Every structure is written in structure tokens, then in C-alpha cells.
Amino acid sequence: AAALRRAAPPDADEARIVLRAVRDVNAPKFLKPDLALFEGIVSDLFPGLEALADPAEAELGAAVDAAAARMGLTPDPAFRHKALELA
């Protein structure tokens, strides 16, 4: 969480930073069917909050879309999601 805090904008809400840290650390450990339960628990712990977005993720997503377009492919959201998971 400390690294996320240092990388976050100065006005970022600390609860959103902690939420992102909790998701980043724990979500990869769950199987897909268990993710819904995990998200439910997290939403109970942090009601009404969305995790702080990763600025690098937006850049990488745009690069994946641009690469797909250069290759004559239609940028598919599922492909983009998978590429971001692998990054």
C-alpha cells in the first residue's frame, strides 16, 4: 500500500488506495467463481468506493488497442482485459 500511496495523486483518498492494494494482492489468488464472493466482501468493507485506477493500465490498454488496430484487428474488450492481466 505504501508504494501505491507514493504513486497516487496527492488528493487521492486513502481508503481507495487501501482498497486497490487489497484487490491487487488478493484477487489473483482466487478462482473465477470465488471472485464474486471476494468482491462482495470487499464492497461490504469499503461501501460505495471504487479502487484507485492504475494510470499505467490506461496507457497499456490504449497501446493494446492501437496495436490491434495496426494489425487490422478490431480491439476486443476481452482481449484487452487478458493483455492487462498478463502485464
Image (cartoon, rainbow, N blue to C red):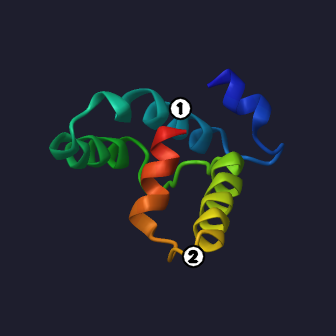
Task: Return the residue found at the far front.
Answer: 71
Question: Which of 51 and 87 lies nearest the eye of the viewer?
Answer: 87
Using the image, tell me which numbered label, if any, was put on residue 72.
2
Question: Which of 74 and 80 lies nearest the eye of the viewer?
Answer: 74
Residue on which the image places disc 1:
21
Give the vertical position of 44 relative to 79 (above or below).
above
Which three-letter amino acid code belongs to the residue tagged 2?
Answer: Gly
Q: Position of residue 75 (x, y in %)?
A: 52, 72
Question: Which of 3 and 69 lies nearest the eye of the viewer?
Answer: 69
Contact? badges 2 and 1 (CB < 8 Å): no
Give the vertical position of 14 relative to 53 (above or below).
above
Residue at left 26%, top 33%?
30
Distance from label 2 to label 1 (Cα)? 36 Å
The answer to which quarter of the image holds residue 41 is top left
Residue at left 25%, top 44%?
35
- Tell me the SS state at disc 2: loop
Task: Return the residue found at the far right.
Answer: 10
